[in-house]
Amino acid sequence: MKHAVVIYEGERYNAVEQNGQLLLVDGALGQINRLVDFDAVQWLPPLAPTKRPRTILALGLNYADHARELEFKAPEEPLVFIKGEGSLIGHNALTYRPPDVKYMHYECELAVVIGKTAKKVKRDDAYDFVQGYTVANDYAIRDYLENWYRPNLRVKNRDTCTPLGPWLVDAADIPNPMALALQTTVNGKVTQRGNTRDMIFDVPFLIEYFSSFMTLQPGDLILTGTPDGVVDCQPGDVIVTEIEGVGALINTITNTRSTVEK
């Protein structure tokens, strides 16, 4: 099932996809069953209020071709950084590009949503701890990078720079998350293609690795990195990051700060 969180007529709802529309299933006033069109709502990151991410873990250079693209050796151990929830925005939202920036690019990533407390999980049991999957677009501003191997806060933890969604797809509906095609288009032109099978560190490995030294909680996110094919994005560009079976996440770049601070 595909789950969403949306605002409709000023109220927040949990919703599910039904025959090309959104079925609003509950809101502040309780249970509801109402079908609305996709363009009638404001999309939020598809995370339940009771399962907000305590921790967002993001992988760098987790595809060998992307490491080569950036002229770096592929890591022998996961290269990980932490993100704050404040960077997350929803489907069809705007991402702000500062006026002094020379190079800002998208990163199409499979995002793993943890479903139950995970501590010292073995690889063979890792998928039992996954609630589902969504699409992340983890923008990077390369101008601000202090060290390619340690992305700093201004590069990877900016307001509006991590679109997420539109759907949270149940893990049961993704039989093999390690064989999903990824694609990014900029203004309708394909600029990035890849497949999750090419990850250096796959999802079971990452859950085992992280849970070996820290406790993962329901709602925590793991952003699994991007393949090669990143390009600079300019104000007005419409970016679609899409993952097979998970969804197509639409985002637009703006250079007007006021449009993202409403």
Image (tube, rainbow, N blue to C red):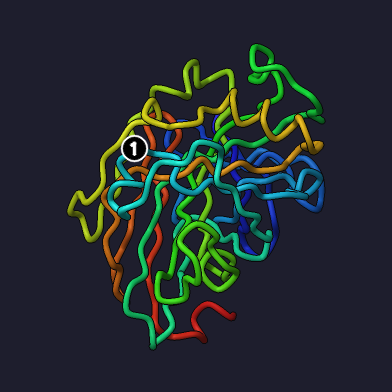
Q: Measuring from the top left, give residue 230's x and y in whole percent.
A: 30, 55
Q: Residue at x 20, y 49 (%)?
A: 190
**Residue type pointed to by label 1:** Leu
Residue 147, visible in the rendered structure: yes
Judging by the rendered image, the residue that carries numbered circle 1 is 182
Left or right, 62 with reference to 241: right
Q: Nearer the viewer, residue 91 or 186?
A: 186
Q: Residue at x 49, y 15 (%)?
A: 175
Above or below for 254 versus 174: below
Quarter of the rendering containing residue 8:
bottom right
Q: Quick one: which residue is furthest to the top in this view?
A: 124
Q: Measuring from the top left, give residue 144's x and y in whole percent.
A: 47, 76
What is the quadrant of the C terminus in the image?
bottom right
Above or below for 62 versus 185: above
Left or right, 231 with reference to 12: left
Q: Nearer the viewer, residue 141 or 160?
A: 141
Q: Measuring from the top left, give residue 210's x and y in whole percent.
A: 70, 35
Q: Residue at x 44, y 32 (%)?
A: 200
Q: Measuring from the top left, give residue 134's x and y in whole percent.
A: 53, 39
Q: Residue at x 43, y 85 (%)?
A: 256
At label 1, counting other C-alpha atoms closer than 10 Å, the crowd grade (few under 14, some 14-19, many 20 or more) is many
As helix, strand or loop, the secondary structure at mark 1 comes to strand
